[in-house]
Every structure is written in structure tokens, then in C-alpha cells.
Image (tube, rainbow, N blue to C red):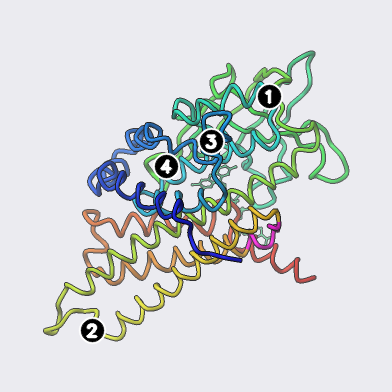
């Protein structure tokens, strides 16, 4: 296992920092958060410079990059603006990775080139009001009707549905004894008649945020099935593991940004005649954060390497998600504390990290669920 980044990967990092320091200024990010405005200009800048094609195959005009390339990119995006990182992760995971794995030729041809140019966005609808952690207990129903399926039900927390062109919708097509069977993934047009989207007010992640979605007699062609009918759970679970890599990379970048802000403050803010970073209570927090960041980044690179080698497991993905999410939450909290009163003021960015990081241990499978996955791999 070699975690050294290649010169190409160092270039990815450097080029993206250069690009985003001009496009994603602190004022721009603050404005997107406060105005609940998706960072469209930043996404367009990434598209214009070819970054949205990073993992797409060359035949589609992409760069055919590796999971580690993607992790490096999402780390930088998360550093500049976590929600930009999450928007890109969704487009690349659901609009490229999932299609390359299970899509038909027509689905790939229809979507991947437009994901690369930033023309279309893609989201993921799994969670329902009564199936969150117990995700495979979902009841949104898709019933075959001639050459179509009719979808009825409700999803919650489909992030970015209101700004997406397509959604991977996970629906029940059959009832078997095991709830994981009889589930099918659909790659649907988000503008189909009968779909109603409502944005939810949330603590953080306000620029794009999340939505609840109502499906009322929605007719979608059978050609929108993604993968095998009734056997979609394995696919959905696989996308979730890839999602855990992406979320962890973007959030480790965001955690580093919070840490650097607090470090700078600890060096410059003076109390009792010296910089507050000279007080052990403050410096030890920063030392702990530095260690958490090192471990998080190493875990991200290691998991990306495992995916590349085809050796990734659900428990590795769970351990990665658990550690990086808990670290991000702790780092955002400690950084805010180091800012003191400034940390609590909306003028400074620490409150945003604090609010945004709170989702890390809940969304994409809570920390408790990650611990359950790890524990069951130990035979418990
Ligand atoms: C802002 C936001 C964005 C999201 N984006 C998406 C998205 O794009 N697409 C999507 O499909 N979903 C999305 N989600 C859903 C997210 O993945 C779920 O919220 C998460 O899986 C938890 O489900 P729940 O909220 O229903 O909580 P519940 O499942 O009701 O859990 C509540 C609490 O009980 C604990 N708990 C539940 N079961 C167990 C257990 N067996 N053992 C121990 N503890 C347990 C949980 O850990 C949690 O602390 C998003 C959620 C939010 C808040």
C-alpha cells in the first residue's frame, strides 16, 4: 500500500486550490449559505476546466481518473466549500459511477456527457419517513404497467432534488420475505408529472440543502430501471459505500479549513499578554485536531486504494465514515471554542462548520449504524 500522491494527484490538488481560491472566496461561500443559493458559478468553473469529467471514462470525454484522484479532488472542494464538494460528489457518484456500474448504454450516453459539462445534476432518493437507518424497509412502490412503471410514495431528505435533472430513486417492485429483495433502482427524470418537491429548512447545509419528495401516480418508462429488477438493494448499498468515500474526503477537507482558521486565530489573538495558542488548554486542542486530520486523510486514501484494488468492504467503508464524521464534528466544535465569542457570531465561518458538520454523524448512515456494521463484522 502506497499512500504517496502521484505528481498528477499533486497537480489536481494545486490546480483546484488555485481555481477555487478565486471562485469560492469566503464572501461567496457566506453568501451561498445565507441566501440558500447553490454554488452554481463554482460548479460551472469546475465544469469549464474539465474537473467534472475526472472519473468519467475517456470515451465520454472524461479523464478516467481513479477513486484516489476523486478523493483528492473532493478534499480540496470540501476545504473551499463543503456543499460544493457534496454537489460534485452526488453528480459524479450517481450521474457517472452508478451508471458506469449498472446503467444501460442509452442511460450512460444520455447523462454522462452532460454531467461532465455541468449541464445536468443527479441526486439520490432512498430515505423515507418510516425508513431511515432501516433503509431497506422502504415502501415507495413502483408497479409495472405495460412498458412503464407507476410510482407512488414519499421520500425525505433527497438532497438537491430541486436542482437536479435526474434522481436515482430506490423503490419497491415486489414483496418477498426478506425486505432487501424486491427493491429496484430507477434513474428517473425529476420533472415527471406527479412529482412534488418541497425544500426543508435545516440547521446547516443551507446552500443546497435537502428536500422531501412526493410521488403521485408518476409514470416512468421501464427503460429507466437501473440494474436488475427486484435486485436493486445490492446496487444501492454499493453506491452508499462509494458515497462514504466521497463524503469522508469532502468533510476531511472542510475539517482542515476549520482547523486552519482556529490555528491562525490561536496565533494572533492575545489574552493575558500572549497569544491564546500559548495556553496548553488551547494548544492541546489544536494538537488533537492535527492528529485527527492526519488519521482521517490516511483513512480516506487507504479506502480509495482499497476501492481501486477491488478490496473494499462494507466494514472498511463504515470505519472510514465513522471516524471522519466524528472527527469533523469534534474539530468544528473545538475550532468554534477557540474562536470564543467570534466563533458564535454569524460573521465568522466557524458557525457554518459547526452547523454543517452536525450532519456528518447522521446523514449517509449515522455513526451508530456504522458501529453496528463494524460490530457485526466482528461476529457480534
Ligand atoms: C440534511 C440531510 C441530507 C440527507 N440527504 C440524503 C439523500 O440525499 N438521500 C437519502 O436517501 N437520504 C438522505 N438523508 C437521510 C439520512 O441518510 C438519514 O437521515 C439517516 O440515515 C438516518 O435516518 P433517520 O433520520 O430516519 O434517523 P432514524 O433511523 O430514525 O434514527 C434516529 C436515531 O436512532 C439511531 N438508531 C436507529 N437505528 C439504530 C440501531 N439499529 N442501532 C443504534 N442506533 C440506531 C440513529 O443512529 C439515530 O441516532 C439525509 C439526511 C439529512 C438530515
Q: Quadrant of the N terminus?
A: bottom right
Number of disc labels: 4
Residue depicted at x 41% and y 55%: 10
Q: Quarter of the image containing the C terminus?
A: bottom right
Q: Nearest to the eye among marks 4 and 2: give it.
A: 2
The circle on residue 201 is: 4
Residue 287 vs residue 182: left or right?
left
Are the two marked residues, 2 and 3, in contact with CB atoms closer than 8 angstroms?
no
The image shows residue 240 at horizontal and vertical percentages of: 63, 48
Q: Closest to the observer: 102 or 362? A: 102
Which picture quadrant has residue 376? Answer: bottom right
Q: Main secondary structure of the magenta part?
A: helix
Q: Position of residue 95 (x, y in %)?
A: 57, 33
**Is residue 181 placed above or below 59 in the rendered structure?**
below
In the rendered image, the vertical position of residue 322 relative to residue 17, given as above or below? below
Residue lying at 62% horizontally and 42% vertically, measured from the top left: 129
Q: Is residue 69 above or below residue 184?
A: below
Q: Nearer the viewer, residue 33 or 284?
A: 284
Separation (CA) of disc 3 from disc 1? 30 Å
Please identify the residue farthest to the top as the structure is shown.
146
Question: Which corner quadrant of the image does residue 224 belong to?
Answer: top right
Q: Earlier in the sequence, mark 4 or mark 2?
A: 4
How far across and down, in percent of the image, does residue 354 sit?
37, 59
**Region rendered in magenta:** 311-318
Q: Mark 1 = which residue?
A: 105
Q: Which numbered tag is attached to residue 212?
A: 3
Q: For the residues marked 1 and 2, what is the alpha-carbon distance in whole angstroms?
A: 60 Å
Separation (CA) of disc 4 from disc 3: 11 Å
Which residue is label 2 attached to? 278
> Of label 4 and label 1, which has the lower sequence position?
1
Amino acid at each position: 500500500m502506497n499512500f504517496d500522491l502521484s505528481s498528477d494527484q499533486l497537480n489536481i490538488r494545486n490546480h483546484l486550490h488555485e481555481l477555487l481560491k478565486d471562485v469560492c472566496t469566503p464572501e461567496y461561500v457566506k453568501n451561498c449559505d445565507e441566501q440558500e443559493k447553490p454554488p452554481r458559478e463554482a460548479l460551472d468553473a469546475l465544469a469549464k476546466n474539465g474537473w467534472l469529467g475526472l472519473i468519467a471514462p475517456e470515451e465520454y470525454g472524461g479523464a478516467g481518473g481513479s477513486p484516489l484522484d476523486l478523493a483528492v479532488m473532493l478534499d480540496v472542494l470540501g476545504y473551499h466549500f463543503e456543499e460544493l464538494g457534496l454537489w460534485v460528489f452526488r453528480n459524479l457518484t450517481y450521474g457517472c459511477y452508478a451508471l458506469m456500474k449498472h446503467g444501460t448504454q442509452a442511460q450512460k450516453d444520455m447523462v454522462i456527457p452532460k454531467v461532465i459539462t455541468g449541464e445536468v445534476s443527479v441526486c439520490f432518493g432512498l430515505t423515507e419517513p418510516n425508513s431511515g437507518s432501516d433503509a431497506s424497509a422502504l415502501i415507495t412502490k413502483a408497479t409495472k404497467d405495460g412498458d412503464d412503471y407507476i410510482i407512488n410514495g414519499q421520500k425525505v431528505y433527497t438532497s438537491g432534488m430541486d436542482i437536479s435533472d435526474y434522481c436515482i430513486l430506490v423503490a419497491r417492485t415486489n414483496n418477498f420475505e426478506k425486505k432487501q429483495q424486491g427493491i429496484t433502482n430507477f434513474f428517473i427524470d425529476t420533472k415527471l408529472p406527479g412529482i412534488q418537491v418541497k425544500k426543508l429548512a435545516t440547521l446547516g447545509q443551507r446552500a443546497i440543502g435537502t428536500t422531501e419528495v412526493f410521488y403521485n401516480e408518476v409514470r416512468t418508462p421501464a427503460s429507466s430501471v437501473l440494474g436488475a429488477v427486484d435486485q436493486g438493494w445490492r446496487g444501492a448499498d454499493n453506491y452508499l459505500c462509494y458515497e462514504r468515500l466521497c463524503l469522508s474526503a469532502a468533510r476531511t477537507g472542510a475539517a482542515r479549513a476549520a482547523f486552519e482558521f482556529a490555528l491562525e486565530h490561536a496565533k494572533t489573538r492575545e489574552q493575558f499578554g500572549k497569544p491564546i495558542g500559548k495556553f496548553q488548554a488551547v494548544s492541546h486542542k489544536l494538537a488533537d485536531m492535527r492528529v485527527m486530520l492526519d488519521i482521517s486523510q490516511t483513512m480516506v486514501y487507504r479506502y480509495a486504494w482499497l476501492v481501486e484494488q477491488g478490496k473494499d468492504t462494507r466494514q472498511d467503508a463504515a470505519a472510514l465514515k465513522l471516524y471522519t464524521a466524528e472527527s469533523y464534528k469534534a474539530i468544528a466544535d473545538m475550532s468554534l471554542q477557540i474562536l470564543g465569542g467570534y466563533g458564535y457570531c454569524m460573521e465568522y465561518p466557524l458557525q457554518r462548520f459547526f452547523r454543517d458538520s452536525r450532519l456528518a454523524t447522521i446523514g449517509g448512515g449515522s455513526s451508530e449504524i456504522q458501529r453496528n456494521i463494524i460490530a457485526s463484522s466482528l461476529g457480534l
